[in-house]
Structures are given as structure tokens and as C-alpha cells.
Amino acid sequence: MDIQKRASEILKIQQSAVQKLTITPVILAAIDNIAAMKKSTGRIITTGIGKAGIIATKMSATLSSIGLPSFFVSPAEAGHGDMGRISPDDLIIVFSHSGSTAEVVSMIENVHLLNGKKNVVIAIGGSDKPKIPADLVISYGAVQESCVVSKVPSTSTTLMLLVADVLAITAAESLGLNDEWFKARHPGGAIGQAYTADKK
């Protein structure tokens, strides 16, 4: 195999998919919902399974680091008590490429039963009509996964990550995110050291 050629093809496939993404009214509505959580007693819950779950975990970490309290709940654990972590005031962001992952659908259905359908749910994936009961559906549409094994999540997870960053960062900036806000949550590591160095 010509490795350079194949690597370039993979890059081109994903670049092409990213370039097709647009900011839609649904994305803007999702940003408003996320920003509104700053004044709420609720938190932002992210969820997903498999590779989508990893993207959900990353979004939760990003949200928390920029001042929007968030945590990840695993669909696999939700039915074993972790659903109790979710209050009626919480916003739920669900990642699922197919929109029909059984564990994820079951989790949201049961959360609605538990909390009386009070949770706003945002679904992010490739389907515009997911089985996940959602108030807002952000769909990037059908995509070509970049691996020769077409079931390997690659292009789809790239798009999920990009959508997650657009939502989180735009929401935080609309609330006034700045260096002081970010620095307060990063006293350690290279980021903390960089802020300390800036003072000198």
C-alpha cells in the first residue's frame, strides 16, 4: 500500500465532511440552551456509548473547564442507578451517529419517565430523525467514514467533536468567557504555569 497516498485520502475525506458543515438554526438554538444553563440550578449532562461516548466525555470536560458545570453519564450505567444523577433541571446532550443506539434510547426514555419529561434533550449525530427522544436534533447527515472498514467511526466522530466545540465555546463566549474566567479553573499544569508566567 502507498501509505502517503492513503493517508492523504483519509485526510481529504474528513476535510471534505468538515467543509460541508454549516451553522443552522438548530445549532443556534442549542447554543442558547447551553448558555441559559449558566443561570440554572441544573447541570449539563453529556452521554453516548462507544466512540461517541468518548466525544461526549470530552465535551463535558470542555464545558466544565470554561465555567459551565457538566458531567458524563454512561448509558450502560444509567439503568443501574446512575440515572439518579440526572435532575429535572439538567440539560442532556446525546451523541449517537445512528440515533438509534439501544442503550442510549433506553436511557433517555427512562430519564423522561423519572423526571416527567422536564429535561431538554439535544441529540447530535448523522440522523435527522433519531429514535432518541430529543427536543433539538443536530444532524450532520450521511458521511463517508474514512476507514476501508466502513463501520469504523472516524469521519463521524470528527464531526461530533467539531459540533461539540462549536456549541460549547460559542455558548461560553456569549456569556463573557475570557482569560480570567479560564485561568480560575486552570491553576495547574502547563496552562496554569503559562498564566503565572504572564504575571511576571
Image (spheres, grey):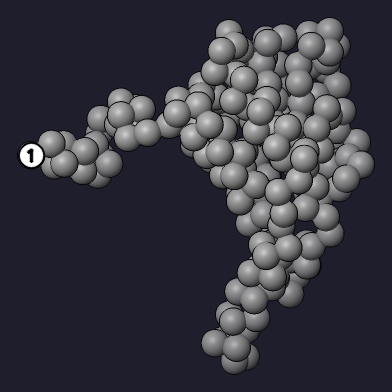
Quadrant location of residue 28? top right
Quadrant location of residue 45? top right
Q: Count residues near mark 1 (Cα–Cα under 10 Å), then give few for <14, some for 14-19, many for 20+.
A: few
**Amino acid at dot 1:** Lys
Q: Nearer the viewer, residue 190 or 136?
A: 136
Q: Nearer the viewer, residue 87 or 78?
A: 87
Residue at point 49%, 34% (across, down): 173
| The N terminus lies in quadrant | bottom right
Give the percent coordinates (x, y) of residue 116.
84, 7
Camera sees residue 76: no
Q: Is residue 86 above or below residue 108?
A: above
Residue at point 64%, 76% (across, down): 12
Pick out the residue farthest to the left.
200
Give the percent coordinates (x, y) of residue 15.
64, 69
Q: Is residue 145 left or right of residue 165?
A: right
Q: Which residue is mark 1?
A: 200
User: Which type of secondary structure does the marked residue at label 1 adopt?
Assistant: loop
Give the percent coordinates (x, y) of residue 40.
59, 11
Q: Is residue 124 left or right of residue 190?
A: right
Quadrant location of residue 166? top right
Camera sees residue 88: yes
Q: Nearer the viewer, residue 124 or 80?
A: 124
